[in-house]
Image (cartoon, grey):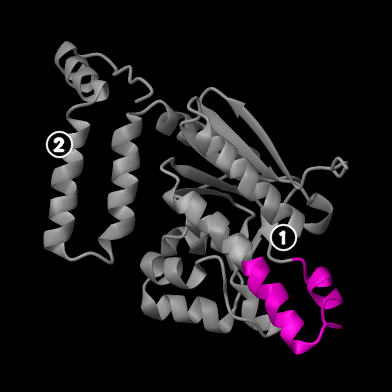
Amino acid sequence: MSDTREPAVLSRHADGVAVLTLNRPAALNALNVAMIDDLRRAAQAALDDPDVGAIVITGAGDHFMAGGDLKWFHQQLHLNEADLRILFEDLIAKVHATTLLLKEGGKPVVAAVRGAAAGFGLSLMMACDLAVAAEDAYFTLAYRHIGISPDGGATWSLPRLVGAKRAAEIALLGDRFGAAQALDWGLVNRVVAKDAVHDEALALAKRLADGPRQALANTRALLQRSLTTGLPEQLAREQASFAQCATTPDFAEGLAAFLEKRPARFGRG
């Protein structure tokens, strides 16, 4: 039987950029099973597409994502303890598979955030390489308010982005904070007017897509490993990566462009 429901994630590709739009605006794009399945499929398709060099994740309507679908969560409470545990272990396994896919997929990801980025919405934003926020955006790691602990890599990302003490404050108190605070704490890269968020995110993604893709993929991997790797090992990784990139056509093009005083025209490799 064919799936006739409206996609929970919309996907469009243009000019080397895949735009993935969380598509449950009536529910503030709250995460449910359909959305996490659709997001994983859309992300995998973008990563597999050789014409795509960067990914933008955004939300339909006025919000990015207001966390998990709490109404659906509540509907599951009739299950016995063992079944409830299995249900949520399976759900979070899917969430985490998508988080790893985005982090390890080799292509840069930009979040375009308007309105709420709460719960897994904040986790998802932190899993992206860059984040552009609207002036009206607001953030909260709200798990404590429903008696649950964070998921989606939040406890991995948060201390690395804001430091241990600030991470504890955000995670343990669950307070809401605005875009200016998120920028000051290093959770987002830029804050722009609400109607400029998507254009700014697309412009950043286009710059990434037009760049030296192997070099950028290697740079992402080096940055991600840096905080769990000793200096000698990190230096060895940098050495191997530099040598690999030096054999690509992009390296030759970058040098030629510099010497000829013109913009580089990087290829797809």
Relative to 241, 36 lies left or right: right
Q: Amino acid at mark 2?
A: Ala
Packing grade of label 2 (10 A; few <14, some 14-19, many >=20) is few
Q: Position of residue 84 (x, y in %)?
A: 75, 81
Label 1 sits on a secondary structure element that is loop
Residue at the location (25% across, 13% down)? 262
- The disc at residue 116 is none
Disc number lying in front (2 or 1): 2
Disc 2 to disc 1, C-alpha distance = 42 Å
**252 versus 54 height, above or below:** above
Q: Quadrant of the N terminus?
A: top right
Q: Quadrant of the C terminus?
A: top left
**166 versus 268 height, above or below:** below
Q: Position of residue 67 (x, y in %)?
A: 68, 65
Q: Which residues are magenta?
A: 69-92
Outermost top residue: 260
- The disc at residue 243 is 2
